[in-house]
Amino acid sequence: MKDFFYAIQDLFVNVLFAPLDALAVLELDNWWAANFLSWIFAVIGLVAFIYWMGQLKKFNANNEEDKSISSHSYL
């Protein structure tokens, strides 16, 4: 049973975390290259946010939403 847990440890430490170790070594040489993927995700998030705000503005301009003020029925 002990060997099973050592196998799990070996899988994570030596195989699955290898890309993260490579990024840690790369960061010592070039910060921009190590964070390239983070910048790509940030740009994708920014584009999605701008698109989302544009869609909200379009639906708000059509006055499709019922904005009448009413409280909940249980109050």
Image (tube, rainbow, N blue to C red):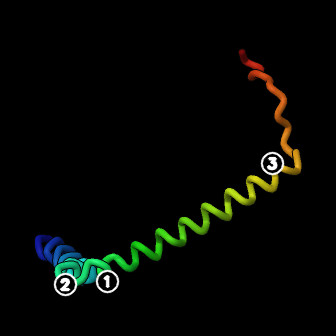
Q: Amino acid at mark 2?
A: Asp
Q: Left or right: 65 with respect to 15?
A: right
Label whose residue precedes the other's in the sequence (1 or 3): 1
In the picture, residue 14 is in which quadrant?
Answer: bottom left
- The percent position of residue 40, horizontal first and vertical second, equals 46, 76
* Residue drawn at the location 82% of the way across and 34% of the way down: 67
- Classify mark 3: helix, strand or loop: helix
Real-space Cα separation, disc 1 to disc 2, in angstroms = 9 Å
Real-space Cα separation, disc 2 to disc 3, in angstroms = 49 Å
- The percent position of residue 26, horizontal first and vertical second, equals 22, 83
Residue labelled with disc 3: 60
Real-space Cα separation, disc 1 to disc 3, in angstroms = 41 Å
In the picture, residue 47 is in which quadrant?
Answer: bottom right
Q: Amino acid at mark 1?
A: Ala
- The percent position of residue 75, horizontal first and vertical second, equals 71, 15
Can the viewer see residue 17?
no
- The percent position of residue 63, horizontal first and vertical second, equals 88, 45
Give the number of the disc on residue 52: none
Q: Amino acid at mark 3?
A: Asn
* Residue drawn at the location 42% of the way across and 74% of the way down: 39
* Marks 1 and 2 close (CB-CB < 8 Å): yes
Residue labelled with disc 2: 29
**Rendered view: 41 above or below 60:** below
In depth, the one of 60 and 71 nearer the eye is: 60
Label whose residue precedes the other's in the sequence (2 or 3): 2
Categorize mark 3 by other alpha carbons within 10 Å: few (<14), some (14-19), many (20+). few
Can the viewer see residue 23?
yes
- Classify mark 2: helix, strand or loop: helix
Residue labelled with disc 1: 33
Q: Residue furthest top?
A: 75
